[in-house]
Amino acid sequence: MTGYGVDVPSGRPASIATPAPGDPRLARLSLNQWTTRRLGVAEAVDGCARYGIPAIGLWREQVAEHGLSASARLVRDAGLRVSSLCRGGFLTGDPGPAVQDNRRAIEEAATLGADCLVLVVGGLPPGSRDLAGARARVAATLAEIVPYAAASGVRLALEPLHPMYCADRAVLSTLAQAVDLASRWPVEEVGVVVDTFHVWWDPEVLTQIARAGDRIASFQVCDFLVPQPADPLLGRGMMGDGVIAFRPLRAAVDAAGYTGPIEVEIFNADVWAADGHEVIATLARRYVTEVL
């Protein structure tokens, strides 16, 4: 579990030894389950325990495969914290199904004891060019689910996505937009996600992180690869493999008062194809050298 290894997916020799379990530098690290997509809940939880990562961000699809109650029990027995549940949202279409699905997601987050339920709000409905209307539907449908989340003790976390995803995934494109929308509700009910991949480019990002303050419900890190692959959804890289300077962003989030988990979330075909435990070892090393 410790010692020098080879970073994945680059194949380069590791620059430092893998931190040992109990290393205080790992105290805030969280593994987002999608980073090790091929690992089920049990394998991902085992990887966290093996490498001393104290938190995990779970995905609803894999929780459903393992079983909701079984997943909650497994995480609890391993002594881990659920830093987030991904994902709810997709609020720009028919509000009826959206409300129903998000109520289910809220119930799942409550059972898991997740710090927050991440909401990806959705893009333009098929055939639509009405961006303002889509954003209005996000706000209206969100207003229907916030009371249920609050009654369930679940904090919702709005995640703005990079503008290249505006049409198909999220009509919230900046942290400022997310904070504006979240501010309609109490801070303990609706927060925001700061994901480095999505916000690093924004000239206002440091100002908006400070403005978000205790609205920050989740801080996620991964790198922005250049060039981007043909499918930009898979353009996230291991920290240090792209162009993002993480420390200024982490320092800003810390200064804003966020003290919660720092979650590594990577969508990348080469990372997914690698051995899951090697991925976890690499991200632990890169977290120490690139983020702290």
Image (spheres, rainbow, N blue to C red):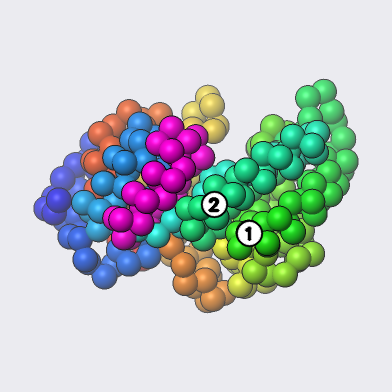
Q: Give the side of residue 27 with respect to residue 146, left or right.
A: left
Q: Nearer the viewer, mark 1 or mark 2?
A: 1
Q: Identity of the amino acid at label 1? A: Ser
Specify the segment rendered in magenta: 54-79
Which secondary structure class fits the magenta region best? Answer: helix
* Relative image position of residue 86 (x, y in whole percent): 54, 45
How far is mark 1 from mark 2, CA to CA? 9 Å
Mark 1 or mark 2, earlier in chain: 2
Q: Which label is found at residue 178?
A: none
At x 79%, y 30%, the residue is: 125
Q: Which residue is mark 2?
A: 109
Contact (Cβ within 8 Å) of mark 1 with mark 2: yes
At x 29%, y 40%, the residue is: 43
Asked whether 269 falls inside the magenta stretch, the response is: no
Q: Secondary structure at mark 1?
A: helix
* Relative image position of residue 246 (x, y in whole percent): 45, 59
Q: Residues within 10 Å of mark 1 (few under 14, many from 20)?
A: some
Q: Give the side of residue 152 with respect to residue 227, left or right.
A: right
Q: Which residue is mark 1?
A: 152
Can residue 22 be seen at all in this image of the molecule? yes
Of 64 and 14, nearer the camera is: 64
At x 25%, y 53%, the residue is: 49
Q: Is residue 128 above or below residue 276?
A: above
* Relative image position of residue 124 (x, y in whole percent): 77, 33
Q: Identity of the amino acid at label 2? A: Ala
Q: Residue furthest front?
A: 69
* Relative image position of residue 163 (x, y in whole percent): 68, 42
